[in-house]
Image: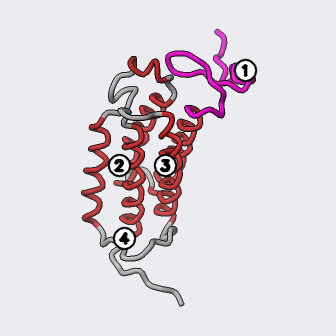
Amino acid sequence: MSKVRVYTRDGDDGTTGLFYGGRVPKDSQLPRAYGTVDEAQAVIGMARAEAGPGSELEGLLIPIMRDLWVLMTELATLPENRSKLEPGATSVEPGMVDRLEKMIDELDTRFDRPTEFVVPGGNKVSGWLDIARTVVRRAERHALMAAPPPSQVVPYLNRLSDLLWTMARWQEGESLPVRRVT
């Protein structure tokens, strides 16, 4: 039995294959958008690893990371093929955005909001969450052209960046006022 190889050589010409077919240049809007989401997912994975196995944060992040696979599938599909996608399985549905809002609302009760701009890096977990937030914001900018309305990709990414900010502050234990260093 022959082993399936990781490489195909299909992309050596600078193109990439898409879900439901078609090929586009690797630097076009769809791969740029889903590639940035993939980067965000990897950084979220670093926050998860730093939080540790079995932590509450890990339990919150794993479903989000699975959502990002759904989101990347939608972004890896040509617009003319998106009608073939299944809400919640291969395309983002409004309920996924609502779930993030509920998480934000619940976590927001666990710390006092900072009254000034936050300096990232209160600890390693919050630092990774803040990096993830900035990558998600970049993914959101790329997704504007790649997944226009009625797609829920942009609202999902917008809410996810808010959630990552909230998680970072929660992980820092922002219950004390921000102190100024002089």
Q: Indicate how the structure is coloured in the image.
A: secondary structure
Cα–Cα span, label 1 and label 2: 37 Å
| Residue that appears at 45% across and 57% down | 51
* Residue under numbered circle 4: 173
Query: Quick check: 12 left or right of 132?
Result: right
Choose the circle earlier in sequence order: 4 or 3: 3
Q: In the rendered view of the protein, which quadrant contains the N terminus?
A: top right
**Viewer-proximal residue, 55 or 102?**
102
In the rendered picture of this protein, how many numbered marks are placed on residues?
Answer: 4
Range of magenta residues: 1-30
Closer mark to the observer between disc 1 and disc 4: 1
Choose the circle earlier in sequence order: 1 or 3: 1
Numbered label attached to residue 60: 2
Cα–Cα span, label 4 and label 3: 23 Å
* Residue under numbered circle 3: 136
> Mark 3 packing: few (<14 Cα in 10 Å), some, or many (20+)?
many
Give SS at disc 1. loop
Cα–Cα span, label 1 and label 3: 29 Å
